[in-house]
Image: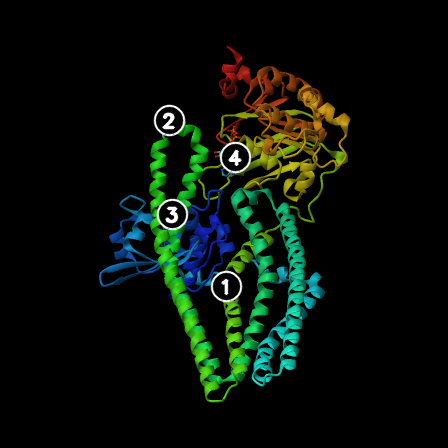
Amino acid sequence: MIGYKNRIKLVRQHDLMDCGPASLSMVTYFYGNKFPLHYLRELCQIGKDGVSMSGIIHAAKKIGMETYSTRLNLDLLVKKFTKPCILYWNKNHFLVLESISNKGGNVNFHIADPAHGKVVLSEKDFKEPWLKGGQSGVALFLSPTHDFFLKKNNSNVKNHFKTIVNFLKPYKKKILVLSFLILLGSAFSVTLPFLTEALIDYGVTPKNLNYISLILLAQLFVFIGIMTINILRNWFTLIIGTKLSVDIVYSYLDKVLKLPLSFFDTKNSGDFNQRIQDNIKVERFLTSDSILTVFSALLLLVYSGILFHYGTSLFLTYIGLTLVSVYWSYYWLKKREVIDYKIFLARSENQEAIYEFYNGIREMKLNQYESYKKNQWVELQNNLLQANIKSLKIEQFQSIGFTFFNQLKNILVTFLAANYVVKDIMTLGALLSVSYIIGQMNSPVHQLLSFFRSQQDAFLSFNRLSEVYTQENEEKESDKKLDPEKTPVDIKIQNVNFKYNVLSHKYILQDIDLTIPRGKITAIVGHSGSGKTTLMKLLLKFFPPLSGKIFYGLDEINGLSSQSIRENSGIVMQDGYIFNDTIERNIALKDKIVDKEKLEKALGAVNLLGFVNSLALKEHTKIGSGGNDLSGGQKQRILIARAIYKNPKYIFLDEATSALDATNEKEVHNNLQKLFKDKTVVIIAHRLSTVQNADQIIVLSEGKMVEQGTHTELIDKKEFYYTLVKDQLNI
Ligand SMILES: Nc1ncnc2c1ncn2[C@@H]1O[C@H](COP(=O)(O)OP(=O)(O)OP(=O)(O)O)[C@@H](O)[C@H]1O
């Protein structure tokens, strides 16, 4: 059996959704069988809103842990606490309570927060986010069973550092030149203290003007040399950095575009943005940060060597006091972590408040909610100010101490060197050389310090990226393409069951069994939330069914290329997107040269030709990102025109004409009926006018197929369909 580690190793969350699996990962480490984040996040069933407590419990059970989740008050938590547990924090986050300490009656809570690191909070600071104004908070206690220790995490995530370093390969030569320049630059810099020494000892002291001129000329050349090298070095760093950044982000975008659509169901745009930033951080780490650090480390080494050459005591004093100042900084930085954490919480509340101002401004004004919200915001600012003041105090302590030790170091080293001069052990030139060196050593020390701090960030970024790179592509090489000769074919759905979250008790689709005949129109109707869109998404291979099968002809959808299904389909989803481009580009999309005849036909079919021709730039008019310059109905018609222009074999329309007025909808549908000829069409709609001409109508209710037939058959039956549309029948 593996022994307990008896401490929590911090596992940082990779994005906003990861706090649950990261917390669980920390607890597994404590018990000595570490399950990494990417493995646990899959078991946790993360949705777009992050992970739920039941998701963490599910994952914990899967890896052989016993769980006990409960609501309890603070006293009980302190009494019950023996081993790390997971807390529900701020009603939107999970973290680990590592230990509780009691010093002279002051209870302190040691938490490991996957978003911010380890912090120690006083009872007051702990209570607020955990209890959130209530009497009790939620805690999940976990303990390992025998199975836990036998389980191996079968995560296939490799360390992708190598992959990223591979990006450097094409720039090998440039990097070599850069390294040479760095070396040369260091060599030039090293000559300066010696030149200073020579200037004083062999020029100024013996009053030798020729020698002084010669040394100063040499210094001038060295400066010019250093300047030239710096210019070249910056050029090379910029070129390598920019090219590398393009390569890395391009490869990332390429990978993202290959991922299954279900991947994006658990990610929001913030995460995507974060990962682009991550790419840039990794690139910076690989280029400018590392290059500057190599340069600094080299200089530091050489300067330390020279200092050692001038006197061991000088060297030891310098190193000793540098270590003291670094330790001082580190101590205060640790102290600042708690305050930084509070600032972070206050800032995120502040951000939420601003966000709500922006989004809810209409409702606020309509319901006279302004002054309440304004006061709430002022209170938040006060909290932020208090935290900022505390942070500033600590920062000042840190910087005063650091500067003090630094100056003390300079004074002491100069004193020792001056002492050597007085005792004739050292020349005056050497003294000046020493003060030059200690002046020059400050910035490399800073660079090294900041490098070690940024390195942690870069590795976190890097792990986040690895997670994307290790995801399987949506398209497999073995996937079969739909045969254009035999397309369209019947689509058969056999006993399909589906739920988005396997932990949920409720099925979104249950025992669906039906055939969508080729060349015919199938309408899917049902109350809102009955699973219509989900069924369409399954047909388009957004998600695999949980059980049951879907066939295109004789081919099961699992073995079919999703790309080829979508290539052969004209699809209008409820949340179809309009690109920030011209009308024609939004309709023709991937066609480089727009087929004007097809474009006109598509615009005509959706009743937009008149509108487009009335615009000054006609089809070349830009329609703004998200179609902001269009009405809801116009946007929908552009999306339908896009599907028509494609002239596909299959057409899938999900509430595609819901925003159109009755007249327009009727006309568009009449036009579509002609275009639907010989195509396999699936339409989801609420309006009777849209579905009554369908060859078959499928009625869904709470995920089950409850009726199937034509409009007349179903009306005659007077059951589900009839109830659904009777208000529109005027009977
Ligand atoms: N990405 C998702 N993750 C989790 N649950 C989802 C997701 N998308 C939809 N659901 C849930 O699945 C159920 C069916 O949704 P679906 O969109 O398929 O219904 P619908 O019949 O198309 O509704 P509407 O007519 O309102 O568009 C709903 O309860 C919804 O909350």
Numbered disc 2: secondary structure: loop
Q: Are marks 2 and 1 in contact (CB under 8 Å)?
A: no
Q: Residues within 10 Å of mark 1 (few under 14, many from 20)?
A: few
Residue located farthest toward the bottom when viewing the structure as drawn: 424
Amino acid type of the residue tagged 4 in the rendering: Leu
Sequence-wise, which precedes: disc 3 or disc 1? 3
Sequence-wise, which precedes: disc 1 or disc 4? 1
Q: Which mark is residue 367?
A: 2
Q: Which residue, given by chain and number where applicable, does mark 3 sit on?
A: 346
Q: Pinpoint residue 415: horizontal percent, then vertical percent.
A: 43, 80
Amino acid type of the residue tagged 2 in the rendering: Asn
Callout count: 4
Amino acid type of the residue tagged 1 in the rendering: Ser
Amino acid type of the residue tagged 3 in the rendering: Ala
Q: Are marks 4 and 2 in contact (CB under 8 Å)?
A: no
Instruction: Tell me where residue 691 sits by quadrant.
Output: top right
Q: Pinpoint residue 132: horizontal percent, then vertical percent.
A: 32, 45
Q: Between tags 3 and 1, which lies in front?
A: 1
Label 2 CB less than 8 angstroms from ligand 1: no
Q: Between tags 4 and 3, which lies in front?
A: 3
Label 4 CB less than 8 angstroms from ligand 1: no
Q: Nearer the viewer, residue 247 or 45?
A: 247
Disc 2/disc 1 C-alpha distance (Å): 50 Å
Disc 2/disc 3 C-alpha distance (Å): 27 Å
Disc 4/disc 2 C-alpha distance (Å): 40 Å
Q: Which residue, given by chain and number where applicable, does mark 4 sit on?
A: 509
Q: Which of 220 and 472 is in front in this view?
A: 220
Q: Residues within 10 Å of mark 2 (few under 14, many from 20)?
A: few
Whether 495 is drawn above or below 461: the answer is above
Disc 3/disc 1 C-alpha distance (Å): 26 Å
Q: How crowded is mark 3: few (under 14 residues within 10 Å), some or many (20 or more)?
A: some
Numbered disc 3: secondary structure: helix
